[in-house]
Image (cartoon, helix red, strand yellow):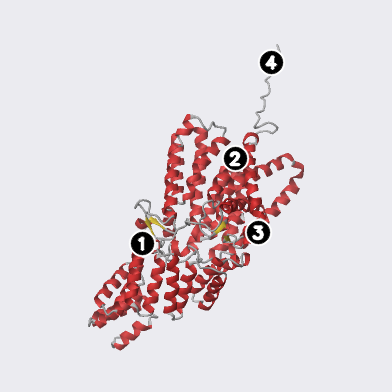
Amino acid sequence: MKPRQAKPRTATKASAGRATPRPPRVGSIVLALAALAAITFGAYVGAFDNAFVQWDDPIYVGENPFVLQKRYDVLSRGVFGTNYHPLTMYSYALNVSSPLSPRPFIVTNVVLHTLNTGLVFWLTFLLSRRRLTVAFLAALLFGIHPMHVESVAWISERKDVLYVFFLLAGAIAYWQYLEKRTWARLGLTFALFLLSCLSKGMAVVFPILMLLLDYWARRPILERRAILEKVPFFATSLLFGLIAINVQSAGDFHGLLTPSSDGLRALPETAPYSTFHRIIFPTYGHLMYVWKLFVPVHLSGLYPYPVTPAETNHPKFVFAFLFFLATLALAAWAARRTRVLAFGIGWYLACIVPVLQWIPVGSAIMADRYTYLSYFGLLFVLAVGIGSLFERYRAMTAILSAGLAIVIALLFIQTRQQVETWRDSEALWGNVIRNFPRCELAYISRGSSRGKAGQIEGAMADLQTALRLGSRRPEMYDGLGNAYASIGKPDSAVLMFDLALKDRPNAGRTYYNRAIAHLIAVHPREALADLEKANELTPLQVPSLHYLRGNAYMQLAMYSEAIAEFDRAIAAGQRVSDSLYNRGVCKLRMGDTAGAMADFRETLRLDPQNALAAEQLRAMGKL
């Protein structure tokens, strides 16, 4: 009797035509991760000597007393830059050094990006049935793509690299939950999702990504357990979505949060475009994101909206709208025919559609940073496709490898060059001006940064260029006000601040600046009124007001009140040496010679170059 022959197993539709790949060895995985870390780190190492830039960095770090003083209690409820992301603010506080240096902040961003590259590798590895080449390629493209430089090299975009770190870790945990269905895995997924939401509001897309992972795993999306397990996720997304909308409109979320944004609104009440343009302009961002995935050139820190009628009515915007519709149609078609394309486009659209400026936020029609998470979907499709080419055309491996190596080398070089555009404010805004020579906001921002650096002539030139371009932005008038105050023209400065407040009457920072101009002009009562208004509008900035209020009382010869304000400034760590000197002057005028002498000596201990304190001690015969 012949032995019974085993029938060959019929290949499933998903695996037909190819053998199941052999799982890679642990050593190969470790080597791949090490190579990814080294290449990614190498692409960004040039950023370590970059400076803070005059674009949100002062709000989040440089001029934020609660970060500088590590006030975690305030950071937990504070709204900074019209964003509520306490974990991001905590991470800034952890990076604060003495003296303050941008390097720890940038190094942390690069480390987080490198870790995210490893998470992209692992997630792709799991989703691609442990295909090492596919995972390595997807992660490498993620790690060195020039469009990601903004999220990594810009200190203010810490929220991007941090929220994506938790979100990718959450996606991996959820995939492992789909494989083993343990509640511990689902609990871990939720914890990581919550941490992601506390790092940036964009994490609210995570439940949609969970549905896409269900789809990829061929799990019925509408089964009862699949629906119930996601209820907490969607509820949390709704909560953080409502918080984001509220604080971007200068709200305090029913008194639970504390704004510190000078009454600024990220969501404008009106837009100067027709309904037609407000529909097609967002789709232009989608078109350019896809284009720059393959041709990442002419990158800019800011992409302004079109201004002239010729720009506004350019055919490219109609084409962009048609391209967006075609993308949606392709995703719908792929959902029934090619799972990898549907998954990749679905991930991309889930992450990019919410930031396509359907509701205009800020002054940019698009931003490189919005691709940081969304590109994973498209890179996944590319990596799977390239991996399939290598498997199908093994005889052409050398040619395909050479071509791929050239592309990777070009991306690496472009990324290193793009890192240089974030070197400092001059480089950043100079690059924007080269790309968009009529961008008024770029001139305003560069002018403001030059003014803070003491380059008053250059600041005035930039701000007046913005004025000639037709700008009437409050920021421009603010910058001109600061410049006039710096060259000793306080009356002109006050006029500029008046114009700024006309369009933005709730800008606490402008009241603060106008108070300084009033003090220079020796108008102490007007200064006190402005400081009171600043105190009302920016409650988190109260510690920075004590020094100026003390100066106003000094000018009014109200020395007891001045000393009390300088005491508060010193206790808050604000302008300590200056406050000590001024307090000493007040004490001297009140006849407290011993107290004045002690303050002048302490001033010199903290600031040995303080000539005024030395002169006072010399006049008292104590130096």
Q: Residues within 10 Å of mark 4 (few under 14, many from 20)?
A: few
Sequence-wise, the earlier of marks 2 and 1 is: 2
Sequence-wise, the earlier of marks 1 and 4 is: 4
> Is residue 99 visible in the rendered structure shown here?
no
Distance from the alpha carbon under mark 3 to that under mark 4: 67 Å
Residue 34: percent from the left, percent from the top?
58, 50
Q: Amino acid at mark 1?
A: Leu
Residue 418 in the figure: left or right of residue 100: right
> Is residue 464 visible in the rendered structure shown here?
yes
Q: What residue did someone put label 1 on?
A: 540
Sequence-wise, the earlier of marks 3 and 2 is: 3
Distance from the alpha carbon under mark 2 to that under mark 1: 44 Å
Quadrant occupied by the N terminus: top right
Quarter-of-image position of residue 262: bottom left
Residue 232 higher or lower than 276, as above or below:
above
Q: What residue did someone put label 3 on?
A: 297
Residue pictured at 33% horizontal, 77% vertical = 524
Q: What residue did someone put label 2 on?
A: 343
Residue pictured at 54% horizontal, 35% vertical = 214
Q: What residue did someone put label 4 on?
A: 3
Asked if labels 1 and 2 touch by Cβ distance under 8 angstroms, the answer is no
Residue 178: percent from the left, percent from the top?
51, 34
Distance from the alpha carbon under mark 1 to that under mark 4: 84 Å
Asked if labels 1 and 3 touch by Cβ distance under 8 angstroms, the answer is no
Q: Amino acid at mark 3?
A: Val
Q: Amino acid at mark 2?
A: Phe
In the image, farthest residue toward the right: 395
Q: Residues within 10 Å of mark 1 (few under 14, many from 20)?
A: many
